[in-house]
Image (spheres, helix red, strand yellow):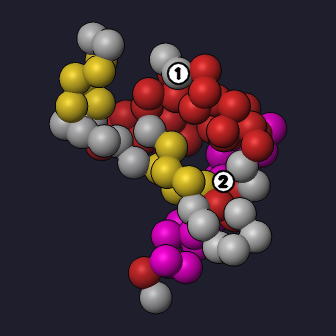
Amino acid sequence: METGYKISINPSLYFQKKHRRVLEACPLKAILTESDGPYKYRGLYLRPDLIPELVETIALIKNVDVNSLIKVINQNLKDIVK
């Protein structure tokens, strides 16, 4: 991640252990979120409106405040679109 790569986390985090392991190893400065949807995956319709709950889950896993995480994710997005 030192090279500026970003990792996009989507709601499949709830089903995929490997996604959780990636998230646990990923520094905050590399995290982005996305819905991968609309798309049906294992009975769950992945949609953009799932992102707020996903961010709360990421905050719990990373043991950070949700509002702080939102600021970091927004900055990460700005870093790649500048």
The relative height of residue 79 versus residue 67 in the rendered view (above or below) is: below
- In the picture, measured across the screen, residue 31 lies left or right of residue 34, that is right
Please report the residue visible at 60 percent of the width from the left and 67 percent of the height from the top. Answer: 5
- Judging by the rendered image, the residue that carries numbered circle 2 is 69
Residue 34 locus on image (x, y percent):
39, 48
Q: Residue furthest bottom?
A: 82
Write the start and end of the magenta stretch as one range: 63-80
- Examine the image and state in which quarter residue 64 appears: top right
Residue 59 falls inside the magenta stretch: no
Please report the residue visible at 51 percent of the width from the left and 43 percent of the height from the top. Answer: 9
The relative height of residue 25 versus residue 74 in the rendered view (above or below) is: above
Please report the residue visible at 34 percent of the width from the left and 42 percent of the height from the top. Answer: 35
Please report the residue visible at 74 percent of the width from the left and 37 percent of the height from the top. Answer: 24
Query: Could you tell me if the residues under marks 1 and 2 are in contact, i.e. CB atoms within 8 Å?
Result: no
Question: Callout 1 environment at 10 Å: few (<14), some (14 to 19), or many (20+)?
Answer: few
Residue 64 falls inside the magenta stretch: yes
Q: Nearer the viewer, mark 1 or mark 2?
A: 1
- In the picture, measured across the screen, residue 29 lies left or right of residue 10, that is right
- Judging by the rendered image, the residue that carries numbered circle 1 is 16
- Examine the image and state in which quarter residue 49 appears: top left
Residue 15 locus on image (x, y percent):
49, 17
Q: Nearer the viewer, residue 71 or 2?
A: 2
Looking at the rendered structure, the kind of residue marked 1 is Gln
Residue 63 locus on image (x, y percent):
80, 38
Residue 25 locus on image (x, y percent):
76, 43
